[in-house]
Image (cartoon, rainbow, N blue to C red):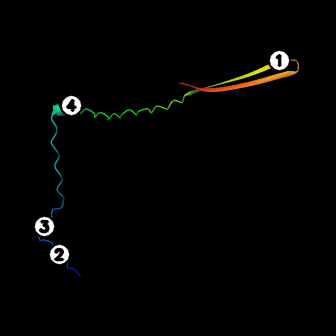
Amino acid sequence: MAKRKKTSKVQKRTGATARRKGRKPSKAARGKAKPKRAPVKKAAARKVKQPVAPAVETVAVEVIEQPAPGVITVTEVEETRQVD
C-alpha cells in the first residue's frame, strides 16, 4: 500500500482567500445602454409556380330529325379541342 504524504509543519490559514471585486465602471459607462443585436433576417421562400394545364373544351351536338312521319334520325357529334 502507498504511504501517505506528510503535511508541512507550518500553521495553515483558516479562511480561504476570497477573490477581489472588479473595478466599478465610470458614470459615463454606466449611463450608456448597449444596443440589442439585430435579429438575422431569413431569406424569403421562393414560390414554385404550378404548371398550368391547357384548357380543354368539349362540344357535343345531338341532332334529332324527323324527315318523314314515323322515321327518326339521330346524329351525334362530339368534338374536343385544347385552348391555349
**At x 11% / y 68%, what residue is drawn?**
10
Q: What amino acid is found at the position of numbered circle 2 in the picture?
A: Lys
Q: Which residue is mark 3?
A: 11
Quick check: marks 1 and 3 in contact, CB under 8 Å?
no
Q: Which residue is mark 1?
A: 67
**At x 21% / y 79%, what residue is drawn?**
2
Please identify the quarter of the rendering in which residue 82 is found: top right
Q: Which residue is mark 2?
A: 5
Q: Which residue is mark 4?
A: 32
Few, some or many C-alpha atoms within 10 Å of disc 4 (few <14, some 14-19, many ≥20)?
few
Q: Which one is nearer the viewer's eye here, 78 or 39?
A: 78
Q: CA distance from mark 1 to mark 3?
A: 136 Å
Q: CA distance from mark 3 to mark 4?
A: 49 Å
The picture places residue 28, in percent across and down from the top left corner, at 16, 31
Q: Secondary structure at mark 1?
A: strand
| Foreground label between 1 and 2 | 1
Quick check: marks 3 and 4 in contact, CB under 8 Å?
no
Q: CA distance from mark 2 to mark 4?
A: 56 Å
Mark 3 or 4 closer to N-term? 3
Q: Secondary structure at mark 2?
A: loop
How many marks do you count on the picture?
Answer: 4
| Left or right relative to 70: residue 35 | left
Mark 4 or 1 closer to N-term? 4
Q: What amino acid is found at the position of numbered circle 4 in the picture?
A: Lys
The picture places residue 24, in percent across and down from the top left corner, at 16, 39
Q: CA distance from mark 4 to mark 1?
A: 103 Å
